[in-house]
Amino acid sequence: MTLSAIPDSLLLDLIKDGIQGDQRSFALKARKLTSKISKFDMELGNKISEVLSSNLTRSLEQNKPIPVDSDTRQELLMLSKPQDLKIEPIWANDIEENIKRISLERAKLHSLLEKGLLPTRSILMEGPPGVGKTLMATLLSKELELPLLTLDLATVMSSYLGKTGSNIRAVLDYAKSFPCILFFDEFDAIAKKRDDDSDVGELKRLVTVLLQAIDEWPTTSLLVAATNHAELLDKAIWRRFDTVISFQLPDKEQISNFLISRTIHPELAKWIANKVQHASFSSLEKKVNHAKKIAILEDKLFEESLCQQFDFDYKEYFLQDTHSRRDLIVHLAQSGLSQQKIAEEVGVSRSTVTRTLKKADI
């Protein structure tokens, strides 16, 4: 393919939009032209893409209305601005490295393009629910300072034949029109294996549309997909993504660190982490929050309520060894409990509580 293969109409429309000052239309046609140029001159295409990623283009294109379903008039995407995370996430080392690398690629985008290299444009995250996939999309939005567009799957999936495909195309066209992160959660719902005979032809055609979109995704944006059911994805999908990140359930150390970050006593956090099995971060978060509510509503010790959430006997922890018992006596005293109440809860004499607190200068 050569420059002569570019339609004259596209070049003329581009010039006309520029003269008339229609910057939105100009940017859209310029991206289409860039896609064609990149097929025979990647270096030139990359340079044009870099120009189109300027702050001016970004501010103009974000004013474009979010696409809606033509029947329900509901928006197909949820737009979120970059935001700080309330609590620092706990990642496995390989996930942290991926985040750092993707951020560094964007910081040195110009240097990569000069060498004919592309940054990561698409990421597939797979793993069980509740392990941080959605959180990572939010973090990338913050790190890259890009708005986050999250697909509203319930609105996009239409019962009318052909409508789902139209909605997906509208979402893809909108997300490609300005620098952003497009996040597909539950990606397996629209990227199923094409050999699944139970699906209608429309969903199979959707996979082809998605494959093409991933291949042609602009360097100025990032397409992020997440799935809890990797086995359902079409095989061709895996090859198209630049980066595939596998999330696992947290190990004992990560569970302990997570609980400590939620202000749980380190000794108790470690004890729970050693006993709990197959827990996700989201399930741990729910148990901690529920334990806090129960402690307030039923006037219980938080530690007791938390252990009950895991079906553990909290007294087993209190009495497991002298060191932990001493630490818990101090901790309970600092929480405002009387020495008599501490003695009853821990299962020791009041004199033992008194001696322990005296040694701890409390």
Image (cartoon, rainbow, N blue to C red):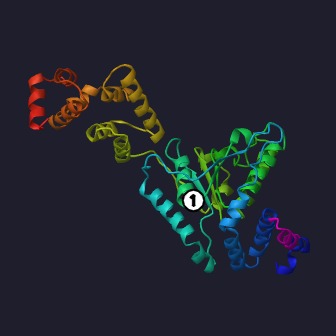
Point 46% across, 36% down: residue: 283
Q: Which residue is mark 1?
A: 145
Residue found at the very far right of the displayed protein:
9
Q: Position of residue 165 (x, y in %)?
A: 80, 47
Vertical placement of residue 40 versus 59, above or below: below
Q: Could you say which is closer to the camera, residue 10 or residue 35?
A: 10
> In the rendered structure, does residue 263 fall within the stretch colored magenta?
no
Point 69% across, 73% down: residue: 51
Q: Main secondary structure of the magenta part?
A: helix
Tell me if I can see residue 258 in this picture.
yes
Point 29% across, 41% down: residue: 270
Image position of 298 (left or right of 234) = left
Tell me if I can see residue 219 in this picture.
no
Q: Position of residue 133 (x, y in %)?
A: 54, 48
Q: Which residues are magenta?
A: 13-22
Instruction: Give, as a three-letter code, the residue at label 1.
Output: Glu
